[in-house]
């Protein structure tokens, strides 16, 4: 008995089409469109894993930057005060990354942080020598929060909030080179030095603050070598007052020792005369 392959195949196909359940094996109408889309977006075989990981890294970096913008650069951001954090609870300790520091100006310290008995007030930053028109740069990466003028204090001043959670203040300026909400990098020019506001001569008034709490800049930075003492500054609320008084108290001890030295020298002269 001879079999006709074509007729057998035709019979089987007809039989399958007659079965009611066959419809469930049919591909959906969208299959062709999805198939074409997959082909259009397929990557060549052997794509380097490195390039894929780089794409993941960039995406992660964008997410982290977006998170920073949502957290650091939104809380109390609209405040027009130098200290926008008044009344909030300050953590006991905090590790602050200061490794990216760039000196705002490379001038000598002319006036240190601490209480000024002569004026009866606290000097919450330190003064750095400059000439009018010298370029002032951002100390860390961050975003400009304020550019304002205060006639009886800072004069023209800039407040920058940084990625590490700190804020720095630059006072007695002559001209702004940035504007609020502008992103800046460490070392980027933000202003020109001046002698505006409550100032007795051209200098930069420079403050370092954490959640509004003023910190002695010399506790963080070596101003002779223009580098931070350590890559991470450990803010400790319990010893914050000690840090505040460190430089002024050291100066007072030095003066006291000189006076004692003079007194002892005069006593020796008197004794020699008596002899």
Image (cartoon, rainbow, N blue to C red):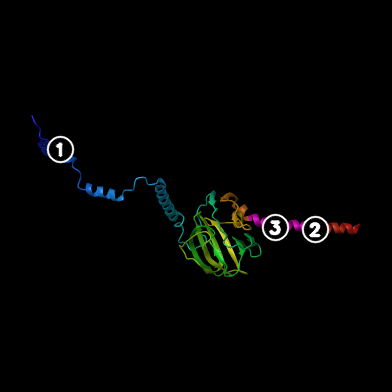
> Image quadrant for the N terminus?
top left
**How far apart are labels 2 and 1 at the CA level?**
114 Å
Indicate the quadrant containing the C terminus: top left, top right, bottom left or bottom right.
bottom right
- Considering the whole magenta stretch, tell me its main secondary structure: helix
Left or right position of 27 against 94: left
Q: Residues within 10 Å of mark 1 (few under 14, many from 20)?
A: few
Residues under labels 3 and 2: Cα distance?
17 Å
Residue found 59% across the figure and 52% down from its top: 240
Residue 169 seen by the camera: yes
Residue 156 percent coordinates (x, y): 54, 68
Measured from the top left, where is residue 131 in percent x and y? 60, 69
Residue that carries the numbered disc 1 in the rendered image = 21
Element at badge 2?
Answer: helix
Circle 3 — which element?
A: helix
Mark 3 or 2 closer to N-term? Answer: 3
Q: Which residue is mark 3?
A: 252
In this picture, which residue range is highlighted in magenta? 245-261
């Amino acid at each position: 008995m001879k079999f006709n392959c074509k007729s057998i195949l035709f019979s089987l196909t007809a039989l399958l089409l007659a079965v009611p359940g066959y419809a469930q094996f049919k591909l959906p109408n969208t299959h062709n469109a999805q198939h074409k889309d997959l082909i259009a977006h397929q990557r060549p075989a052997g794509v380097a894993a490195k390039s894929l990981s780089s794409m993941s890294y960039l995406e992660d970096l964008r997410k982290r930057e977006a998170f920073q913008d949502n957290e650091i650069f939104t809380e109390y951001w609209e405040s027009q005060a130098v200290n926008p954090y008044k009344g909030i609870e300050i953590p006991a300790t905090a590790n602050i990354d200061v490794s990216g520091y760039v000196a705002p100006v490379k001038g000598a310290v002319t006036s240190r942080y601490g209480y000024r008995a002569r004026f009866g007030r606290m000097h919450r930053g330190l003064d750095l020598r400059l000439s009018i028109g010298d370029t002032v740069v951002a100390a860390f990466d961050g975003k400009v929060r304020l550019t304002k003028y205060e006639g009886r204090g800072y004069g023209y001043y800039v407040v920058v909030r940084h990625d590490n959670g700190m804020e720095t203040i630059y006072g007695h300026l002559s001209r702004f080179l940035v504007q609020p909400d502008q992103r800046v990098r460490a070392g980027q020019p933000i202003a020109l030095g001046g002698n505006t506001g409550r100032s007795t001569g051209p200098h930069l008034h420079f403050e370092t603050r954490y959640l509004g709490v003023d910190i002695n800049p010399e506790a963080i930075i070596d101003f002779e070598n223009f580098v931070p003492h350590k890559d991470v500054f450990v803010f400790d609320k319990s010893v914050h007052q000690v840090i505040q008084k460190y430089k002024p108290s050291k100066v007072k001890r030095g003066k006291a020792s000189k006076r004692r030295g003079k007194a002892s020298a005069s006593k020796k002269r008197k004794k020699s005369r008596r002899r």
